[in-house]
Amino acid sequence: MTTLTPRHAHPDVAGAASVGTASAVTAAGAIALETAHAAHNYHPLEVVVASGDGAWVTDVDGRRYLDCLAAYSAVNFGHSNPVLLDAARAQLGRITLTSRAFYNDQLGSFVTALAELCGKDMVLPMNTGAEAVESGIKVARAWGYRVKGVAADQANIIVAAGNFHGRTTTIISFSDDESARSGFGPFTPGFRIVPFGDAAALEAAIDENTVAVLLEPIQGEAGIIVPPADYLPSVREITQRHNVLFIADEIQSGLGRTGATFACDLVGVVPDLYLLGKALGGGIVPVSAVVGNADILGVLKPGEHGSTFGGNPLAAAVGLAVVQMLATGEYQERARDLGTRLHTGLTELIGHGVVGLRGAGLWAGIDIDPKLAPGRAVCEALMARGVLAKDTHGSTIRLAPPIVVSAEDVDWAVEQLRIVLEELSAH
């Protein structure tokens, strides 16, 4: 296991090995237990996180790391955010779950605030991002049959190549990632895949049975792929003209990450449905939602869709606190400003081990020269220097620190990447 030593620590946290109280669990022991008894559906970096504060996490040995993954944007507001913890603690002492067989005193305030943040009037609360996507698919099909008049069981939905919307059976049916698909068929029909960023191809795939277009405004798992500036506006115009719903999966890109409330805002586009998750739960509880207007979400009738935990009081209390934080605009502005700083620093590495760079706000996809090392090796080297990041698709790595990260920490993370690339080049 590679670990951070004091000489590699951030200048502000030198001697970090002694920070806090080390866990009674050893790193080797934790890794052995997880490897033996947890299904091997992930390949984690060998760091055992025990606590977190803001943009930093601490391992079981007391060593600190700058978290530049933020749990795939689920921790946009930082670890142990005091506002969110206070909201959770207050609700924990009252009631946490009622099911939606009854009303609770938190859900109404949450869905009202979230609808207002989105400029819509109705919210379908769920738990995970994949549940939000599955729910959006069901809503789109029901709308197609009940409002548009598509013949029974003939609805189709257009999606983009390179997409990542989750790993449920239905969702992997329209993935082109063989690691997610292979060995899990038969697959669910009713989806058409077109190239991401190609509005003409998207329009050509529409027919009388098309009910929706489902897209990530910026593709996250694919490597932070940003489409041409005119793409989403073209998709919005095409879908309106053909009476087709535009569903924006903002589960990773939304809620402040890109320097706007939603990535769609960056190009002035408003979809019919937003799919939200990850950061909506503040890194505390899983919270997701489908948000739209009543003429679409209103197609659902009692008994047709549900979730025991969806809309529970604890989730609603935390979700409301998240929405109230976003309503100030402070986090969006911070992600814009620090994102400019991050991308400026990373741009200087192009030609010095970096061969490509994409992103928006505090979200960057960095293509490492494959001659140097695969992305996994780069992330392991960064971990040794106190930066936690995640690779994807070969030699691409992603940086997405919590929005509460400091400007100095952003600069420091870029500097650690520069050092790692120099060391790899020297070999």
Image (cartoon, grey):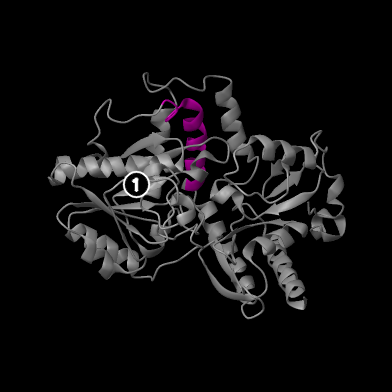
Q: Is residue 76 visible?
A: no
Q: Residue at x 39, y 43 (%)?
A: 169
Asked where in the image residue 146 lies, by quadrant, the reply is top left
Q: Nearer the viewer, residue 28 or 181?
A: 181
How many numbered marks appear? 1
Q: Is residue 197 above or below residue 45?
A: below
Q: Is residue 311 magenta?
A: yes
**Which quadrant of the figure contains the C terminus?**
bottom right
Would you call the spot at circle 1 few (<14 residues within 10 Å), some (14-19), or many (20 or more)?
few
Q: Residue 66's spot in the image, x, y percent?
A: 70, 54
Tag 1 residue: 187
Q: Residue furthest bottom?
A: 351
Q: Residue 42's spot in the image, x, y percent?
A: 59, 47
Amino acid tagged 1: Phe
Q: Residue at x 49, y 42 (%)?
A: 280
Give the residues drawn in magenta, as a range: 308-326
Q: Is residue 199 visible?
A: yes
Q: Residue furthest front?
A: 183
Question: Would residue 213 be found to the left or right of residue 224 on screen?
Answer: left
Q: Is residue 316 above or below residue 210?
A: above
Question: Would residue 401 be found to the left or right of residue 185 on screen?
Answer: right
Question: Would residue 240 be found to the left or right of residue 283 on screen?
Answer: left
Q: Is residue 170 magenta?
A: no
Asked where in the image residue 362 lies, by quadrant, the reply is bottom right
Q: Residue 114's spot in the image, x, y percent?
A: 40, 41
Question: Would residue 104 be found to the left or right of residue 340 on screen?
Answer: left
Q: Residue 238's spot in the image, x, y percent?
A: 22, 63
Label 1 secondary element = loop
